[in-house]
Image (cartoon, rainbow, N blue to C red):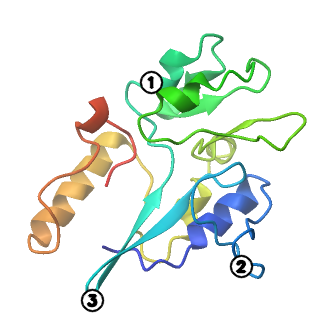
Amino acid sequence: TLCIGCKTCVVACHKANDLEPDTRTDDLHDAPLSLNDQTKNIIKLYKEGDRVSYMKQQCMHCVDPACVGACMIGALQKREYGIVTWDSNRCIGCRYCQVACPYNIPKFQWASAAPKIVKCELCNHRLAEGKIPACCEVCPRQAVIYGKRDELLAEAKRRIAENPGRYVDKVYGEEDGGGTQVLY
């Protein structure tokens, strides 16, 4: 409910991860409609009558990630901070991770001669430098925040308790899909 749909997080992600702006649907703006081979997170718009809401879609960094279990070579692994990462040196391009992911997150670069799997890795290169993920750093409303899972759950429950009419009394990801580290 804090997101205003500015998509600053999408642009920051492209910059932080050296991805080209996705202008395939809009020649002037970085405005992807869905996750794809050059977009690691998006903001989706939902309308119901005169009500409008936004939702950020990215890798959920599952507590027990199906993509990691499906990767027979170990190219996808759950690493420090619980981040699910992809290792280009190990990947054989089988794309089992795409099939296994219940959230339809990993994307394959079909048009590339040396294709990669593209998915959010919570800017692990920035974390190594003591920074936070780019999407969290630029969010003007703190709709996207970064921290330890237990602290994020406490914050989510605090927001629900302070505004009971504004939210459904549930933190998506607390138990859903076995638990995720990206929470809504």
Task: Look at the numbered discs 3 and 1 and tell me whether their residues touch, using CB distance below 8 Å.
Answer: no
Residue that appears at 42% across and 76% down = 141
Q: Element type at marker 3?
A: loop
Query: Between marks 2 and 3, how big is the CA–CA gap?
Result: 26 Å
Query: Between marks 2 and 1, how big is the CA–CA gap?
Result: 34 Å
Instruction: Tell me if residue 124 comes above or below residue 86 in the rendering.
Output: below
Q: Nearer the viewer, residue 72 or 146?
A: 72
Which numbered disc flags the more N-terminal residue, 2 or 1?
Answer: 2
Type of amino acid at the residue the image marks with label 1:
Ala
- Horizontal arrangement in the rendering, residue 38 relative to residue 68 (left or right): right
For label 2, the residue is 29
Q: Measuring from the top left, give residue 11's x and y in whole percent.
A: 67, 68
- The residue carrying pointer 1 sits among few (fewer than 14), some (14 to 19) or many (20 or more) residues within 10 Å by Cα, namely some
Q: Element type at marker 1?
A: helix
Q: Which mark is residue 50?
A: 3
Q: Nearer the viewer, residue 105 or 163?
A: 105
Query: Between marks 3 and 1, how big is the CA–CA gap?
Result: 38 Å
Instruction: Tell me if residue 80 comes above or below residue 157 in the rendering.
Output: above
Q: Is residue 144 something one can see in this rendering?
A: no
Which numbered disc flags the more N-terminal residue, 3 or 1?
Answer: 3
Instruction: Tell me if residue 59 comes above or below residue 156 in the rendering.
Output: above
Q: Which quarter of the rendering shows the N terminus? A: bottom left
Q: From the viewer's perspective, is the residue at label 2 or at label 3 nearer?
A: 3
Residue that appears at 81% across and 35% down = 115
Type of amino acid at the residue the image marks with label 2:
His
Residue that appears at 73% across and 52% down = 17
Quarter location, residue 86: top right
Type of amino acid at the residue the image marks with label 3:
Asp
Instruction: Tell me if residue 50 comes above or below residue 54 in the rendering.
Output: below
Quarter location, residue 8: bottom right
For label 1, the residue is 66
- Horizontal arrangement in the rendering, residue 143 relative to residue 88 (left or right): left
